[in-house]
Amino acid sequence: MLSKAVRIDRHGGPEELKIVEVDVGDPGPGEIRIRHKAVGLNFIDTYQRSGLYPFQMPLQLGMEAAGVVEAVGEGVTHLQAGDRAAYASQPPGAYCELRVMPARSVCKLPDGISFETGAAMMLKGLTAQYLLKKTLPVEGLQSGDFIVFHAAAGGVGLIACQWARALGLKLIGTAGTDAKCQLALDHGAAHAINYSTGGFAAKVREITGGKGVKVVYDSVGKDTFDGSIDCLRPLGLLAVFGNGSGPVPPVSLGTLASKGSLYVTRPTLFTHIATREATQAMADDLFSVVESGAVKIPVDQRYPLVDVQQAHRDLEARKTTGCTVLTL
Ligand code: NDP
């Protein structure tokens, strides 16, 4: 069976993204074949395209999608042909109409959640889940606690704003424009700071009465690392989970002592969804906050799959907000 797919033959800019036709076969043991209805775009796709995260070539990009299961391989018991399904998965390969992939990462999509929402939310929503519920300071997080969440108007960011509000956390969101700050506030951030004007740490101190916060969730990396450290109270945790502005250069551990026995972690979703059981438990949590309406998945941009180069350009130029879907 033939499928349109997006591949690169070498790392580089968006111009390296090429539409090709690939032949898709039958699923082997532990695999399924899925026909996509929508594909999610993620910032991590740009790292894999550029070579910040190196891969062997050729590489079919894409880490999340939703669609209908067409066939299941031997040993797959949690899915059957005809099921609506969605996933976030490693290795990449979701930028296509049809693919064969490991069944382990794929979950049945509840009837009340559309394919578009499913495609937009798996990687970003599971990330918000493990950050807010499993990436915690030694003192834990209690209702009423302040946290800082950078790039709060982005895909992961707008989901985190809503989920944090549902958990009773006071999320201080940062974003690059005043309009994006307003969007974060509209989605449940308690405060928003435009970090393009500098000095976000001083503003966080002001908001928290000089105390600082228990956790900073930082996907911006290089440009925000020092300021993020300055937002923390003693025993606070900095979770650097992305490199929007580039990777963080080597750090002197002595800084962590002098600023109050701080913790730093560099987590990745793929540790948390390494088993099918863990993936399903986290997905069930995500499905329940989405079905309850506590978290609405904001799909703010849609591009046909063939316009994937433009989608990458806009994402890297900070022109997008919320989630972006590639349509088929
Ligand atoms: P976003 O929609 O949040 O887009 C990235 C945002 O980062 C931009 O919109 C921009 O917001 C901000 N940004 C800050 N500095 C820069 C810069 N120099 N260049 C480009 N953007 C910049 O993307 P996603 O929701 O897909 O992902 C958010 C982050 O989370 C990414 O860094 C991603 O790698 C990370 N991630 C990590 C995971 C993990 O498990 N470790 C899993 C999933 C995502 P603004 O203009 O407001 O600054």
Image (cartoon, rainbow, N blue to C red):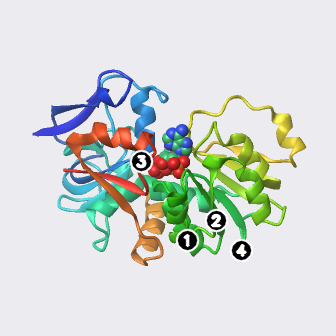
User: Earlier along the polypeptide chain: callout 1 or callout 3?
Assistant: 1
Tag in front: 3 or 2: 3
User: Earlier along the polypeptide chain: callout 2 or callout 4?
Assistant: 4
Say which residue label 2 marks.
171
User: Earlier along the polypeptide chain: callout 3 or callout 4?
Assistant: 4
Left or right position of 3 against 121? left
* Residue 114 lies in quadrant: bottom left
Which residue is rendered at x = 30% and y = 40% of the image? 310
* Residue type (three-letter) at the residue carrying disc 4: Gly
* Residue 144 badge: 4
Which residue is rendered at x = 81% and y = 35% of the image? 253
Q: Position of residue 308 (x, y in %)?
A: 28, 40
Say which residue label 3 marks.
319
Q: Position of residue 176 (x, y in %)?
A: 55, 50
Give how far apart the Cα atoms at labels 4 and 1 are: 13 Å
- For disc 1, the neighbor class at 10 Å (few under 14, some 14 to 19, many from 20) is many
- Outermost residue toward the bottom in this view: 292
Tag in front: 2 or 4: 2
Ligand 1 within 8 angstroms of badge 3 C-beta: yes
* Residue type (three-letter) at the residue carrying disc 2: Leu
Tag in front: 4 or 1: 1
Give how far apart the Cα atoms at labels 3 and 4 are: 32 Å
Say which residue label 1 marks.
188
